Amino acid sequence: MATDASPKFKKAELIPVPQQPEYHPDIAAAEHDGLHFWQFMVAGSIAGMVEHMAMFPVDTIKTQMQALGSCPIKSASVKQALGSILRSDGPKGLYRGIGAMGLGAGPAHAVYFSVYEFCKKSFSGGNPDNHAAHAVSGVCATVASDAVLTPMDMVKQRLQLGSSPYKGVFDCVRRVLSEEGFQAFYASYRTTVLMNAPFTAVHFATYEAAKRGLMEVSPESVSDERLVVHATAGAAAGALAAALTTPLDVVKTQLQCQGVCGCDRFVSGSIRDVVRTIIRKDGYRGLMRGWMPRMLFHAPAAAICWSTYEAAKSFFQELNDSNSSGKVT
């Protein structure tokens, strides 16, 4: 009798909801949903700042390799680009423009991650295995964040060039405004969005899939290995997305650096015009210029960014739990 009666008196809210075969509630519970909007923004801002500051020298090398494709020097390897920077400016040359990135990365990543979390919650319907929702959320996030970051990214890349004519961030902003107008800050925005939309779609979908795959290998040790899981999944996502979108990144660099240090100036500013010029001067290989430092940047940068972001989310989750210890989630 007792065994027959027990199912009848189970509380309805405790009856398991039908789920996908691979879905594990203990893993889903660890995904830090329920944070306040401002907490996602702060976590994203910290993650973006740490990521870009840590990997800035590699980004400088990539920029010089991509810009050289349209300048008098036809080509350069990673070693040649690094040697050129060190000879002309010394180690400090690797950090030219870091102030511009510092000003742009924090706000842009705050927008990036908060929009992503909002869209992921809205589109996924609570299903952590909905990779299409993760990809679409990533695209929405990058369109919003690129509007914030693009002007400072343009300033950063012009300062990163060898023999840059600008004295610093504010000198670059002032001269670009007076000589080229406000539209120059957004000359590459369309290209940036076209590049970052597939980049973030691949990045977020790969990250979420890799994260859940790694967690499911050993669900009982998820808490102990969280940092390693996020770093590994982030690195894989960053490397794959970077490799696939390098041609558009080359176009973006050319548009942002046009007319500076001997780089070509494009009349129309269209992607087709830039691609045609690159192919004519350097062949199709010119579209992959800087792919190695780009991957070397994005793999560890994504690992740093995601692990920092998830650590910040964990901090806020614990803070929220301590403030409402009696609340049932």
Image (cartoon, rainbow, N blue to C red):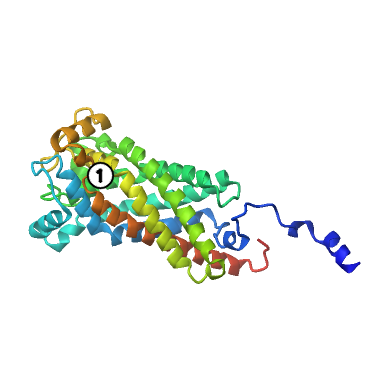
User: Can residue 102 be seen?
Assistant: no
Quadrant into which the C terminus falls = bottom right
| x and y, in percent, of residue 109 in the image | 39, 52
Name the residue at 8% across, 56% down: 88
The residue at 18%/58% (across/down) is: 94
Label 1 sits on residue: 154
Amino acid at dot 1? Met
* Residue 8 visible, this angle: yes
Sort mark 1 into few (<14), some (14-19) or many (20+) by Cα contacts within 10 Å.
Answer: many
- The quadrant where residue 106 appears: bottom left
Closer to the camera in the image, 291 or 170? 291
- Residue 49 is drawn in which quadrant? bottom left
Tell me the element at label 1: helix
Q: In the rendered view, tell whether residue 237 sits above or below residue 187.
A: below
On the image, which quarter does residue 66 sit in? top left
Q: How many marks?
A: 1
Relative to 184, is 227 on the left or the right? right
Q: Nearer the viewer, residue 329 or 319?
A: 329
- The residue closer to the viewer here, 264 or 178, is 264
Among all residues in the image, which is located at the extreme top? 268
- Rendered location of residue 204, percent (x, y): 44, 50
In the image, residue 77 lies at what x, y percent? Answer: 15, 52
Q: Which residue occupies 62% across, 51% down?
A: 20
Q: Quadrant of the N terminus?
A: bottom right
224 relative to 249 in the view: left or right: right
Image x and y of residue 279, in percent: 18, 34
In percent of the image, x 57 and y 64: which residue is there? 320
